[in-house]
Image (cartoon, rainbow, N blue to C red):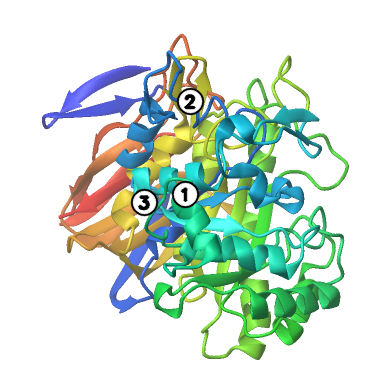
Amino acid sequence: MKKTISGGLLILALATPAAAQTATVRVTVDTAKAGAVIDRHIYGQFAEHLGTGIYGGIWVGEDSKIPNIRGYRSDVVAALKKIHVPVVRWPGGCFADLYNWRDGIGPRAKRPTRINVHWGGVTDNNAFGTHEFMDFAELIGADPYVSMNVGSLSPYDSAQWVEYMTSSEDASLANERRANGRDKPWQLKYLGIGNETWGCGGNMSGEYSASINARYSTFVNAPVSMGMVKVASGGSGNIGDYKAFTEAMMKGGGRLQALSFHYYAMPDNGRSKGPATGFGEDRWREELALTMKMEGYLSDVSAIMDKYDPGKKVALYADEWGSWYTQEPGSHPGFLFQQNALRDAEVAALSLNIFHRHTDRVKLAAIAQMVNVLQAMILTDGPKMLLTPTYHVFDMYQPFMEATPLAASTSSPEYTKDVPMVDASVARGKDGKLWLALVNTDPNKPAHVVTNLAGTGKGQILTGPAMDTHNTFDKPDTIHPVAYKGGSAEGKAVFDLPPRSVVVVTVN
């Protein structure tokens, strides 16, 4: 790999095999045909009490030698602020289905220690509870998304928790919150009515889950002025009949405001998940093909929702998504710690492009997860921290937040079945600029992209010398974005993409 300077910008040039023939790809943009605005909340995060995702990843306590802000890691807070995280979902996940909110309030020294039966059988001293989470969300500028426990607690318990967080009245629960250190109510933007009720959230049928949602959502309310959105537990692309589950929820779930959908890009045919690094092209190819399945799942679920909600008033939230591999050798069983490589950057970019194509329904998404778990944005090890390739994609894609997507057709050869060699997303940013994201999924061949857009483009590129290029605590900057510049042919913007690359540019 070598770095060169072109036009005053840093360009990353990767040597490719002599036999690697450049493919020509055409991207045609209709600037007059716009879609619904890309809601910034599709760039959301998920933080569960799982492994070191919370303890050690976000929270170290005020007395820690690790630099912190009131107990929150300073380095993690700064990194999350930089990418303007719009929403954080908490406390789970499966952890939420046995969580009692009262365990996590009051003086920390008096909080009970519970066993995390879902994730590793380790103990949780509840040092990170409601106050810590809600204050963390405020600290990084994100909207809180709290998942209720409908699997093992009653609607009354859930109603009390919401009142505790959101009431401004001179009433017992609000006064208890004040006594615990928070005077003003928090702004609770999103409330999950359960989590994966088809699985760890209760093993419910679609019909029973719909009934549960209608029941809980009736009794669990925040002040109307807060505009809290209640999110019903929807289906998953990783379960058998997600269509039937969606149908049941839309038909009998009560007055729905939003419906969740979960999908992890992992094999479902008995094949092992495979390693996060040290894999061959077969695993690269398989993972990207699995990622692209999200497109079909969102289309299927949206079509069912259209039957019951033709006005598209009910939003679709992909609030768990990402890659899922075999956890790192030597890591604690059940902690789901995995490395994060260039392949995951492609998974992230392709997924975000898919969400951009479904903005009529998809208004929120949450990658799983924020720190140290599954497709993490950030990895920590004691005082050390690194940013993953996935984090860098979210950073590069920031101009797409609240941008208006434009119709774009791509004429591209397939890299493998149902995976185009080049995937594209185009939008008009809030800044008025035209932004273009390009993903070359082929790990071996470069692509020459010809557009119908006048001018030239410049921005950033993320790539590396191998499919599993990744950062380590000893070498945390092995892979990161560098400046990139396109060209012009006959007055139109053109781009030369090296293999296995993600590019985001503004076209002038």
Which type of secondary structure does the marked residue at label 3 adopt? strand
User: Residue 462: horizontal and vertical position, in percent?
Assistant: 38, 34
How much space separates mark 3 and mark 1, taking CA atoms?
49 Å
Is residue 229 shown left or right of residue 50? Answer: left
Q: What residue type is labelled 2?
A: Gly
Of residues 206 and 485, which is closer to you in this image?
A: 206
Quadrant assignment, res 334: top right
User: Residue 163: horizontal and vertical position, in percent?
Assistant: 54, 66
Quadrant assignment, res 255: bottom right
Mark whose residue sits in front, 3 or 1 = 1
- Does 213 sit above or below residue 477? below
Mark whose residue sits in front, 1 or 2 = 1
- Does 207 sit above or below residue 418? below
How much space separates mark 1 and mark 2, taking CA atoms?
21 Å
Name the residue located 64 percent from the left edge and 38 percent from the top edge.
49
Is residue 65 shown left or right of residue 468? Answer: left
Marked residue nearer the N-terminal end (3 or 1): 1
Q: In which quarter of the image is the C terminus?
A: bottom left
- Does 143 sit above or below residue 367? below
Q: In which quarter of the image is the N terminus?
A: top left
Q: Are marks 3 and 2 in contact (CB under 8 Å)?
A: no
Classify 10 Å Cα crowding around label 3: few (below 14), some (14-19), many (20 and above).
many
The dot on residue 179 is: 1
Q: Name the residue carrying label 3.
A: 437
Name the residue located 43 percent from the left edge and 37 percent from the top edge.
391
